[in-house]
Amino acid sequence: MATSSSRSCLQYLFHLAHDNLDFRLPEIKALLALRAKPFCPCENFKEKVPFWCLDGLSEEDVRSIMARSVCAKSAFELWGHGPTHTELRTSLLNYPLEKMKPFMHKDSTYRINVYTFNTTLEFADRIKKIDAMDYLPFEGTVSLKSPQHIFCLLEDYGTDPNNIPEHPNYIYFGRWIANGQRELIRSYSVKNRHFIGNTSMDAGLSFIMANHAKVKENDFVFDPFVGTGSLLVACAHFGAYVCGTDIDYNTIHGKGRSSRKNQTWRGPDENIRANLRQYGTEKMYLDVMVSDASKPVWRNAAFIDAIITDPPYGIRESTRKTGSHKDTSKPPDGMYVESHVPVSQAYHLSDIFTDLLNFSAHHLVMGGRLVYWLPVYRPEYCEEMVPLHPCLQLISNCEQTLSSHTSRRLITMEKVKEPEEVDSLAHLSNPRFSPYQGHNAFREKYFSGVNKKCGKEDNISEVNGQ
């Protein structure tokens, strides 16, 4: 068996899922950063294709990435590649024999799989392709059930399902290293979760956010708009200690009407802690509390490794903060009874994100990351609408389309300097702040677009006589 040092710095092939295209590159970069490795693609790298070739990695680096990635399906040690099978053969015959031998000696067992992207092959055709590779010096025994080594022939037929070519656009061959964590999307599905709400984050996106934030074991992760805790669940899976706050008393305490079909009221044990208990990560749960994200409740110190959140947009969840435009008398000594419900007022989106960035600048450790969703009205969106902060560097900006006229951007920022007093007001002099205030009308623009669409459909129905 080859040592890890002798097999370092080879070229590796990553087969990526063809969903969440925008999120793949930042996720792989973040996971490489956890290993202190740069992102080094091959010269013909294309971000949107399903196969990426990366240089300068070791097998341990690849296994570390695949142990966390939900955007990557599989990873391989690349032995040969080419646009045709003839050129693939030439490439494989030029691959150093000493790098092949540890996996082909007579005492080894192996299996060859054939994978095709954007098409399917009959079993007989797969066998023919495997038999055609008899020029490789395999000396071991074939074992279909439990081979020591798995080799894969991968054929890329493009990404257009309506225009599949007769022959593959490109072909790869290599040794399988590891699979990604796509199974987490199913095993952590919100459909099977004990405690959910109207806006519980999709499991796949939750894990992507945790990866963008470079969450690692023993980190302290905070969600200021925690809701039903989907993001805490994902971070706890990676070994982080988690906590959060939310202004909604009923959600934090698992009370009120249920969001689950055919269930009227939430049960007595429906809460965030129960969700982590469901997945065996309750020991990573610190606590959650009812709190207003616009009010300072934490000591003035940098102690949070990552802030990951999905603020309310005013669509399915209201944007509220405590306070009133009227003068109200307070109870003596500022004491409130347990059932007291504080007066609330509108919390504009521009204020939400200004407060979030200021909070992150003060409470993130140096190098800590903020990952959050920014809702946008697509016809008016421009990069200048993404709010900035002097202490936070923009790392990535990924789009998830919600409708023809709305989307949300997954924003990842990293703390690069400690805040000064003037930094908390920097947004007022920032030319980006003015167009960003347009987010305050996101709710009106969202429903305006929905109403226009419904009206258009009604007109079509009338024309068709329906």
Image: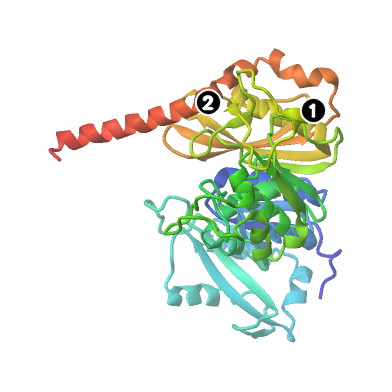
Applied colour scheme: rainbow
Q: Secondary structure at mark 2?
A: loop
**Residue at the spot of label 1:** 391
Residue 257 image position (x, y, % from top left)? 50, 50
Question: Which residue is situated farthest in the front direction here?
Answer: 332
Return the residue nearer the eye: 313 or 78.
Answer: 313
Type of amino acid under label 1: Cys
Residue 177 image position (x, y, % from top left)? 70, 66
Which quarter shows the C terminus? top left
Disc nearer the start of the sequence (2/1): 2
When asked about the image quadrant of residue 164, the answer is bottom left
| Above/below status of 59 relative to 364 | below
Name the residue rendered at 81%, 50% in the picture. Answer: 219
Q: Are marks 2 and 1 in contact (CB under 8 Å)?
A: no
Residue 186 image position (x, y, % from top left)? 55, 63
When asked about the image quadrant of residue 383, the answer is top right
Q: Which mark is residue 377?
A: none
Name the residue rendered at 87%, 35% in the picture. Answer: 301
Question: Which residue is situated farthest in the left direction here?
Answer: 465
Type of amino acid under label 2: Tyr
**Residue at the spot of label 2:** 381
Q: Secondary structure at mark 1?
A: loop
Q: CA distance from mark 2 to mark 1?
A: 24 Å
